[in-house]
Image (cartoon, coloured by chain):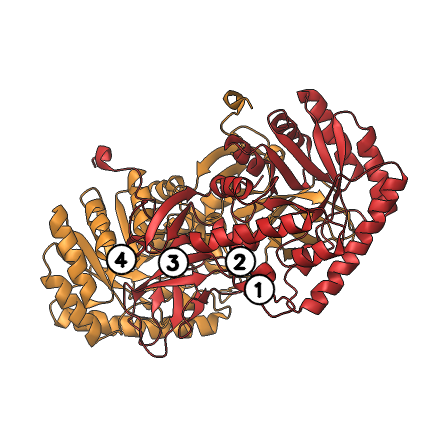
Chain colours: A red, B orange
Amino acid sequence: MDLETLEVGYDIPARPGQRVVEVLTPALIIDLDRFERNLGRMRNFIARHGLRLRAHAKTHKSADIALRQIVEGGACGICCQKVSEAEAFVRAGITDILVSNEVRGDARADRLAWLAAKARIIVCVDDIRSVGELSLAAQRHGSTLEVLVEIDCGAHRCGVAPGAAAVDLACAVNEAPALRFEGLQAYQGSLQHIEAPVERRRNAETAAQATRTTVEMLAAAGMECRTVGGAGTGSFAMDAELGVINELQCGSYIFMDAHYDRVKEDGGGKPGGMENALFVMAGVMSTAIPGRPVCDAGLKALAVDSGLPRVDRAEIRYVRATDEHGVLDDPERVLDVGDRLLLVPGHCDPTCNLHDWYVAVRGERVEAIWPVTARGKLF
Amino acid sequence: MDLETLEVGYDIPARPGQRVVEVLTPALIIDLDRFERNLGRMRNFIARHGLRLRAHAKTHKSADIALRQIVEGGACGICCQKVSEAEAFVRAGITDILVSNEVRGDARADRLAWLAAKARIIVCVDDIRSVGELSLAAQRHGSTLEVLVEIDCGAHRCGVAPGAAAVDLACAVNEAPALRFEGLQAYQGSLQHIEAPVERRRNAETAAQATRTTVEMLAAAGMECRTVGGAGTGSFAMDAELGVINELQCGSYIFMDAHYDRVKEDGGGKPGGMENALFVMAGVMSTAIPGRPVCDAGLKALAVDSGLPRVDRAEIRYVRATDEHGVLDDPERVLDVGDRLLLVPGHCDPTCNLHDWYVAVRGERVEAIWPVTARGKLF
């Protein structure tokens, strides 16, 4: 075997300048025109409402996209969820990062504090013991970690109860060496995908009321919340009206997905008027069973936790996913081997995490290839 | 920011020699003792039945594991599903590979034929046009592609109908320059997870009968099937009895998963007596909600297409997965932050594809770190 001739790079699905029909499938496609319109919609929204945007990079895990969100999209920085993700973004030149999650244990706290000597790092706490871990680590590295106290706004995942428990924890942060109390993490994740706007708004109001009360109690105790972070793509318009959150943490807005297709605004449109800008391009690879063609994108190219993908052609449905195959329903038998389909993933975040590359296209041409910088950064 | 001091390698969850309790979570763990017993069980099984094993590497995507399957586990080679996967395995030194799937389009056929100049490459066809694509490509590269005609044994995905259609296609392969007819691909994927052994056996018998008829028709037409490939972890014992398949393509047997926990043999045990050898080790990161602790392994660390993971402790259940969190039910409130749990993934193949590294452990120590060589190789 002649190892010398094994070229590097076949694993890249396309090259800039190629025609879209030449992209190897399955591939993660960004429609740049739509993506840029989504960026602009959010930039205008935060300007109009006097809010900050800290775009959630867990959606895309891409340094190229994060930089565009900051430079062109009005974001003050990014969120991510894991220390290893934050590290990948710091390596790529992003200098203002909230790990919108609890970081527990001395090893992780140590690494986060080490990063905080190189970039602005903010982190969440929901346990007094975490304050000690982070403070010791930051002292070791001579860095400062900024801290948001996470409150449970109704999602019942992480976060202390709003009110007195949050104030107690904020006091502990305030007194801990090498930590700086920055405000509250008030993200209500479970309301983002409530489809009916009336019910979504009711949940957003409950969360906002609990958050407002906590902010006021903190102020009475002499602690100002410079940041009240929260809001997602399903709730940001409501949260802006409610006026408690001052730093939006939306992620999916740049891409949207089939799950968000079902989440409606009052007028019936999608949240913020955002457009689907992310697709998995699949190729038909077998038509052996009439009316049931098979494409080359299955469970390893598409996350199905929030449902199967929607085919961007009304007459075709994606009906079954196995590891490397997707079975299609094609009642009119219009598809042939080699035909390409754009699939709108059920859930954008875990779908992006399956791929190594974004193929950024404009019209019929590939314009850029962006690595999924923090893919698989789990710790 | 001092880029020079950003070390490479934090993204590796452990180092050989570390204690298992030091592994960064979430991490993909192989229990080496169980894994080696599974390897041995299959090696003994094929020896006893006079069968070949072509282990399916789509399960693990790891060159280290593939080499162990060949050197210690009795396998004659491996299967994989994509050209880019095959290329990653050839680069890693594996020299006998079946792409147990259709490879369509001139670009992919070209790359496969190029690989066939460096290793033994076998591929499936279910369309006469594919024969032309592959033959032209192999002629261009001066290589020979071996070909299995795929028949639909009841899974209704890819494959021509058993019988005359398969014979016609085999004749075309036989006559095509630079192709060699090797036999049949007769894998019935949809029966592997039928839980009741009686019903699973009925499906295996139907598939075997269709396959046997096709083998006999091919023989009558002067075409010998050197390889009749098929069988999975749920059916290999039955397929061995039925006596048509001569090359087993089992993948999950080395690891097993929570879905295969429910697939029973006649005596009530797991297929082939295999043991769970693969786990996602998760750490508890929040206990803010009493009785509902949160661990650090969610949708990006665990595939949930076949159900949520099973916790390897009877009193704890994993009840909800979000992107980076897993919510646990802990009615006795025994868990605290920092506690570690071994989770048996719902579906091993797409779970492994989420991770960059296997942490191979023996007892309380990390013995090796193996890359997931072909992770994300989708084309």
Is disc 3 in contact with disc 1, using a CB cutoff of under 8 Å? no
Residue type indicated by callout 4: Val
Asked whether the viewer can see residue B121, the reply is yes
Provide the residue designation for mark 1: A270
Q: Is residue B119 left or right of residue B27?
A: left
Q: Are marks 2 and 4 on the same chain?
A: no
Q: Are marks 3 and 4 on the same chain?
A: no
Q: Are marks 3 and 2 on the same chain?
A: yes
Q: CA distance from mark 4 to mark 1?
A: 39 Å
Q: Position of residue A98 (x, y in %)?
A: 64, 39
Provide the residue designation for mark 2: A256
Crowding at mark 4 (Cα within 10 Å: few <14, some 14-19, many 20+): many
- Say which chain tag 2 marks: A
Q: CA distance from mark 2 to mark 1?
A: 9 Å
Residue type indicated by callout 1: Lys
Q: CA distance from mark 3 to mark 4?
A: 17 Å
Task: Tell me which corner region of the image, top left, top right, bottom left or bottom right, holds residue A194.
Answer: bottom right
Task: Tell me which corner region of the image, top left, top right, bottom left or bottom right, holds residue B248.
Answer: bottom left
Asked whether the viewer can see residue B13, the reply is no
Seen at 52% across and 35% down, the residue is A88
